[in-house]
Amino acid sequence: MTRPTTQIFDAAATARLMPYAALVDALERASIDYAQERIASPERLVVPLNASGIMLSMPATAPDLAIHKLVNVCASNRARDLPTIHGQVMAFDADTGETLFVLDGPTVTGRRTAAMSMLGVATFTQNTPREFLLIGTGTQAHNHLEAIGELYPDARVWVQGSAPARAEAFCAAQRGKVRELRAFTQPAQPVQGGAAIPASVDVVIALTTSRQPVYDEAARAGRLVIGVGAFTPEMVEIGANTLAGSALFVDDPAGAKHEAGDFIQARVDWARVGGIAAVLGNAEPLPTGPVMFKSVGCAAWDLAACRVAREVLAHKNP
């Protein structure tokens, strides 16, 4: 019997297969599935490449689907004017093991990471956010701005970079993605006392690879703080001042203990840290005070993204 040719999608086609609203819904389901062990997502395997590069192998399986993300991260590519991340996400039939389709790895990672932040917004904010602050001007800032534009198109978005010119250039390039986009030109450094960032900001999302806090305001009722960029024990974006007064949550409790540098550097008591799945599944009440949500990612979220892509493809090819 002749098998159909496996479909391979480039970055643009991959993005079209996973709208953010559908991704948020799929991540909510996957968070609960993963917490209840209906998704198997082992710790990622890391092997070295030349010039301090790394290859990451991240499989995940569920009764309805299996996936494998294989990505290479090469920081030295910046000097070559090449992307620092390359790779693919392969989706498989969970019964036969046959390859269903192949997606662009960096695109899947970027979109499901931004969607996880949006799930955090939907879960931990009581009112529709009107103002966001994005700290960082890289690829993840682009993904998050797209997600906000799709889900909160009337929001005002501030962007803070490592230098004012970076924030201004980012805003100039991204005009039209949301109703109002402004560069926040205060330097990216720890902020004490809350004077620098407008009190009207409802959600702060840190998207850097900093090794020192880029946000350290006292916890503020009505403001959700999300840490995304720090993914090693040495990286820190959110300072201890913010953590001390916040209820702490993570997307993946197992992975966070090894990767959430914000918490590790602050020597947070892990008994204080809850998983978002517990709130989504109503095992824990929704916190009423300030919340800091840390996202570290795992292959279960890539599986959720592949579920969305499979659904979109099924409607395109009935």
Image: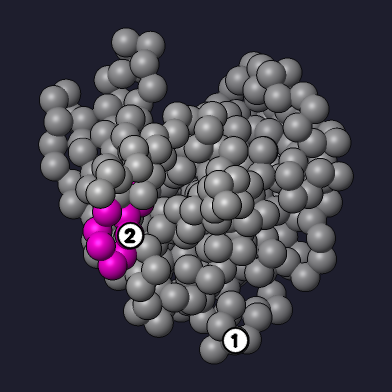
Q: Which residue is mark 2?
A: 93
Q: Position of residue 70 (x, y in %)?
A: 27, 42
Tell me whether the residue at label 2 lies in contact with that at label 1, contact meaning CB atoms closer than 8 angstroms. Answer: no
Q: Position of residue 189 (x, y in %)?
A: 56, 37
Task: Determine if the magenta segment contains residue 92.
Answer: yes
Report how far apart the C-alphas of labels 2 and 1 lie in the structure.
31 Å
Q: Residue at x 32, y 12 (%)?
A: 79
**Label disc, if present, on residue 159 of the rendered structure:** none
Kind of residue indicated by mark 1: Asn
Q: Name the element at disc 1.
A: loop
Q: Residues within 10 Å of mark 2 (few under 14, many from 20)?
A: some
Q: Which residue is mark 1?
A: 282
Q: Is 268 in front, or is 85?
A: 85
Q: Position of residue 102 (x, y in %)?
A: 37, 41
Query: Which segment did they paint magenta?
Result: 90-98
Q: Main secondary structure of the magenta part?
A: loop
Give the side of residue 247 with respect to residue 11, left or right. Answer: right
Residue placed farthest to the bottom in the image? 283
Q: Is 226 in front, or is 236?
A: 226
Q: Nearer the viewer, mark 2 or mark 1?
A: 2
Task: Determine if the magenta segment contains residue 91.
Answer: yes
Kind of residue indicated by mark 2: Asp
